[in-house]
Amino acid sequence: PLGAGDTLHIVAGGNKFFNAVTFTNQGTVNWADTLYLQSGAVLNNAGLWLASGDHGFVNNGGATSVFNNTGTFRKAGTGGTSSIGNFAFVNSGIVDVQSGTLLLAGGNVAINAGSQFIGAGVTNVGSNATFSGAFTSANLLLSGGGVFTGNSAVLGGSVNFAGGYISGSWEIAAGQTL
């Protein structure tokens, strides 16, 4: 694993692939270029994953890849869109979009208990997602034609619902907004 206090810089230039690997971040990853995941790659973020540009994670084939976030995924520095493509994004940590938009578009999004969506930007869930347990939001947008399934989901904060289908079991906590 990338240990606490260590830093990996994913810089511009050349193609970058995570192929059939399990990579665990406990430090800081500065992500500044497109990253290709393939053949069931698993990224475990327990530290800080910093998206400093408008780039994407791209599914490049093979078994479904997974990004597990139990730490902080932060988008900062630009007003454009960073996207997470057609693979699983599983969150029980913090998604901090300080500027622009983080687009979760893969259709395999799992928002678990303890998830927090913060920042002045927008976290856009643009495809199918499952919400389990209590989570908080200051900037979450549900859009597109996705199915947003609640599994005893409890919303604290506010969520903008711009399109799609809400199904399952949802609770909007007292004084909160959907």
Image (cartoon, helix red, strand yellow):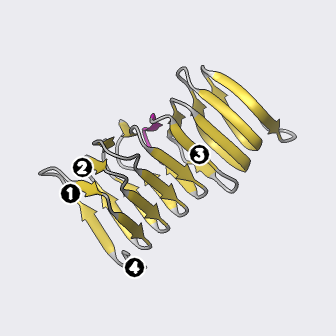
CB of mark 1 within 8 Å of CB of mark 2?
yes
Choose the circle earlier in sequence order: 3 or 1: 1
**Amino acid tagged 1:** Val
Q: Picture coordinates of residue 60 (x, y %)? A: 27, 42
Label for residue 11?
1
Q: What element carries label 1?
A: loop
Calculate the distance from the C-alpha at mark 3 to the C-alpha at mark 1.
28 Å
Label for residue 33?
2
Q: What element carries label 4?
A: loop
Choose the circle earlier in sequence order: 1 or 2: 1
**Eyeballing the image, is 80 above or below 92?**
above
Q: Name the residue under label 4.
A: 3
**Amino acid tagged 4:** Gly
Most foreground residue, 147 or 96: 147
Which tag is nearer the camera, tag 3 or tag 1? 3
Choose the circle earlier in sequence order: 1 or 4: 4
**Amino acid tagged 3:** Ala
Residue segment shown in magenta: 98-105
Q: What element carries label 3?
A: strand
Side of 175 where 131 appears, left or right: left
